[in-house]
Structure formats: C-alpha cells, structure tokens
C-alpha cells in the first residue's frame, strides 16, 4: 500500500474563487444542476449550498459582521469529503461498494452501489448524497483516477493560493503545523488544525486549518462513528424484545386461563 495521501486546507488563504468547484465538476463530469433545478441558497455568495451527489467540493462563505456592518470579516473554506481513517460510510455499506484504496482514500464504486442511503445516514459530516443522474451515492474520490496516473487532484491543482494542498499525510501535517505556528507568531492565536491527529475518527485524510470553532464552518466539533452508539442501542433493543416477549407470554397465559374458565361454565 502506498503512503496515505490527502488534502490539507488552509482556510486563511482561501479567496472564495471556486476554481476548485469548477475543476472538480469538469474533471469528474458532474452535472451542473441537480436534476435541472437551479436552487440558490440566498445566503451570501454561496450558490452550491452544500456537499452532495453532484457537488463534491463546496466553498463556504461565512460572514461575521457587526449589526451595522461597520466591522467584520469573511471566513472562507473549501469543504470536501474527509476520507476518514475510521470511515463510517465504509462500515455500513451492505454491498461493499465503498472501498479503501491503496492511497488510504475512501471511494464509492457506483457499479456496486444499490442506492440504499445507509452511507448518507452514517456520515457524520453530511458529505454523501445521491447523484440524480446515476441514482447512486457519490462523493469526492480524491481524483482516484488521477492518483493512479501520478497526477494531482483537479481541485488542488486549480487552487491559485495553495489553500488546498495535496500530498502525503505525514508531509501535510508537518506543513500545517508550521503554518499554525506562523499564524500564532503573527498574532492569530485562534488558528488550529481540525482532524489532523488520530483523536478524530483515527485521523482525517482531508484536514483543515481553522480560526474559529468548527460549528462556525458547519463542521461537527466531535464527530462519532455510528457504531459507538450501537452498544447502548443494542441493549435497549434487547430489553425491548424481552419486554415484548414477556407481555406476549402474559397475554397468552391470560387467554388460556379465560378459555379454560369458559369451558367450565
């Protein structure tokens, strides 16, 4: 297996140009609109709204201004699939359509997907959705076909400011940590890395440098694997089944007793 590859996104240098969105759609031949519907968010300059089956890159525009708009700032972030080391989507897929590649990335094989939507529900980041053109679940592949040919993913190749950086995870983590230190020295004490270490789902192969809380960017502060909740859920299910069984036995015995009483009469 090759050394794990991925993305490091420095949100402090994103200019919101959407070159990554365009490059992603062009290379992967994704539909321009959702089933022919043009649905604008009505929120700032965001016209793609969120990640889904036809938008594998999404540039988020977060406005932080005072009420009179006299002071404020923009937070911009190009969001994408996190290619989690502990991938919930991969675990729940009933047809093994979701695989981990030799680059440690997570890819959905459309020809094996039955459109059950289990992966959509399981993903803690809301990354996956159905592509209306194919009827199957789809998301970023980290340009798996390009990686196999020794090429850089289309989005990072197109990024004019190196906000999106591609490489080995070990190299990206080193670059990202140096950038955080640089920002701290420059006075931006809020800068930190989101998902760069193993504490978050074993590590995200697409991690981010942020300068505000994850929720501000639409990211969960503490994403969980769905299986983490199965133990308690299974316990309640078992207890529920036992309770239903006991009620059934009780009712059966009551019916039997009533029947015997009626025969005596």
Image (tube, rainbow, N blue to C red):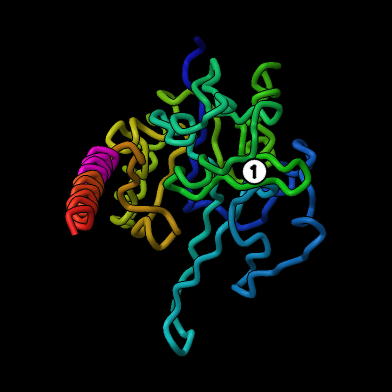
Across and down, in percent, residue 186 comes to 34, 53
Residue 109, by quadrant, is top right
Which residue sits at x=42%, y=54%? 219
Q: Is residue 242 above or below residue 106?
A: below
Which residue sits at x=53%, y=19%? 103
Across and down, in percent, residue 199 comes to 27, 35
Dot 1 corresponds to which residue?
159
Q: Is residue 254 above or below residue 49?
A: above
The mark tally for this picture is 1
Viewer-closest of 245 and 234: 245
Q: Quadrant of the C terminus?
A: bottom left
Which residue sits at x=34%, y=59%? 213
Magenta span of residues: 229-242
Residue 67, by quadrant, is bottom left
Residues packed near mark 1 inside 10 Å, few (<14), some (14 to 19) or many (20 plus): some
Would you say residue 247 is visible in this rendering?
no
């Amino acid at each position: 297996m090759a050394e794990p590859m991925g993305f490091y996104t420095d949100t402090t240098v994103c200019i919101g140009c959407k070159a990554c969105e365009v490059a992603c759609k062009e290379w992967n031949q994704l539909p321009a609109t959702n089933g022919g519907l043009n649905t604008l968010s009505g929120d700032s300059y965001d016209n793609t709204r969120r990640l889904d089956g036809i938008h594998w890159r999404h540039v988020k525009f977060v406005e932080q201004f005072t009420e009179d708009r006299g002071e404020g700032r923009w937070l911009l972030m190009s969001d994408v699939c996190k290619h989690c080391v502990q991938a919930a989507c991969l675990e729940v897929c009933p047809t093994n359509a979701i695989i981990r590649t030799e680059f440690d990335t997570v890819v959905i094989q459309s020809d094996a997907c039955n459109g059950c939507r289990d992966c959509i529900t399981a993903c803690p980041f809301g990354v996956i959705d159905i592509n209306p053109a194919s009827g199957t679940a789809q998301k970023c592949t980290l340009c798996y076909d390009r990686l196999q040919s020794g090429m850089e993913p289309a989005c990072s190749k197109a990024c004019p400011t190196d906000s999106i950086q591609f490489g080995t995870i070990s190299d990206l983590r080193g670059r990202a940590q140096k950038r955080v230190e640089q920002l701290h020295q420059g006075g931006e004490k809020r800068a930190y890395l989101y998902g760069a270490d193993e504490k978050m789902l074993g590590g995200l192969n697409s991690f981010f440098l942020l300068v505000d809380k994850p929720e501000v960017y639409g990211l969960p502060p503490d994403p969980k694997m769905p299986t983490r909740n199965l133990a308690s859920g299974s316990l309640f299910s078992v207890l529920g089944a036992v309770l239903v069984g006991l009620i059934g036995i009780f009712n059966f015995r009551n019916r039997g007793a009533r029947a015997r009483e009626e025969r005596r009469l």
